[in-house]
Amino acid sequence: MSADVMASTRGSNVLRETWIVFNRAMRLSLRNPMWSILMLSQPLMYLFLFGPLLKPITAQISEGATTNAYQVFIPGLIVQLGMFGAMFVGFGLIAEYRAGVIEADRVTPASRIALMAGRVLRDVVVLVAQSVLLLVAALPLGLRAPWKGVLLSLVIVALLGATFASLSYSVALITKSEDALAPLLNGIAMPLLLLSGILLPMQIGPTWLQRLSDISPLKHVVNGVRAMFRGEVASSAALWGLFWVVLLTVVGLAVGARTFRKESA
């Protein structure tokens, strides 16, 4: 058998195994949708309880770029959902580890990449569905955005979800303990939330805070999605946002794949 045929066979096997793992993970999520509902409830509360407060100061916080408060606020919530909706999926993997699921996976001939990719794909599908519901809920409140910007924002949610889900699974496999995972993720999540400009653009803050926030790639992702919601899909802000989210995805998937191969060997 030639090398090309062998490579094609391995590739098709990985795709098939990924689909099998995805189907199992998705069935588990549909049987117990409470986690997905809880993760969506936080952005919805921000939308209904915090969003109206921005209307009187929209011109100020957007520097005149838009008068629609939800063109400023919804992009931040989209990024928040993609980030925090996937950051804590590792707890489910720890539960599977204790139930012996990971040990059972180890004795199967399934690709270790497929074991991760199937779970990550499930998380991405759930996050995109949640994002669509969030966008629909924002329409009656006054959200107006071009369809190209909305579609690109969903792509970014999918990429962020894949990034943070992969990293979360990696840390979960390494720690194998909720007691270690919880404080670690919370310690990372808070600085990311505060420095990314998810709730309010960092441009309205003092200079030192703006410079500090420049370190966070997520700030550029948020600014990029805001530009897309204004219809500026080819602007430098949008392109920088896409660059950073693609880079984060490559790094996150590489780390996740390496950890799954090592810990599931």
Image (cartoon, rainbow, N blue to C red):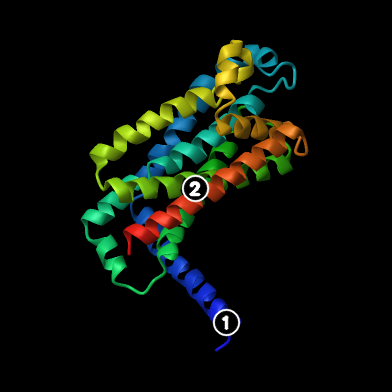
As drawn, the residue found furthest toward the bottom would be 1
Q: Secondary structure at mark 1?
A: helix
Figure quadrant of the C terminus = bottom left
Amino acid type, label 2: Gly
Label 2 crowd (10 A; few <14 / some 14-19 / many >=20)? many
Figure quadrant of the N terminus = bottom right
Q: Position of residue 225 (x, y in %)?
A: 65, 35
Q: Is residue 263 left or right of residue 164?
A: left
Is residue 232 at all visible to an observer of this figure? yes
Look at the picture and state if 63 lies above or below 247.
Answer: above
Q: Residue at x 37, y 41 (%)?
A: 88
Q: Position of residue 205 (x, y in %)?
A: 59, 13
Residue 208: quadrant of the picture: top right
Which residue is identified by label 1? 3
N-terminal of the pair, mark 1 or mark 2, is 1
Is residue 129 at all visible to an observer of this figure? no
Mark 1–mark 2 contact, CB under 8 Å?
no
Q: CA distance from mark 1 to mark 2?
A: 29 Å
Residue 73: quadrant of the picture: top right
Q: Is residue 171 left or right of residue 70?
A: left
Q: Residue 197's mark?
A: none
Q: Is residue 187 left or right of residue 145?
A: left
Q: Is residue 182 left or right of residue 245?
A: left
Amino acid type, label 1: Ala
Which residue is identified by label 2? 252
Q: Residue at x 22, y 57 (%)?
A: 99
User: Toward the viewer: 225 or 111?
Assistant: 111
User: Toward the viewer: 94 or 30?
Assistant: 94
User: Toward the viewer: 128 or 221?
Assistant: 221
Q: Secondary structure at mark 2?
A: helix
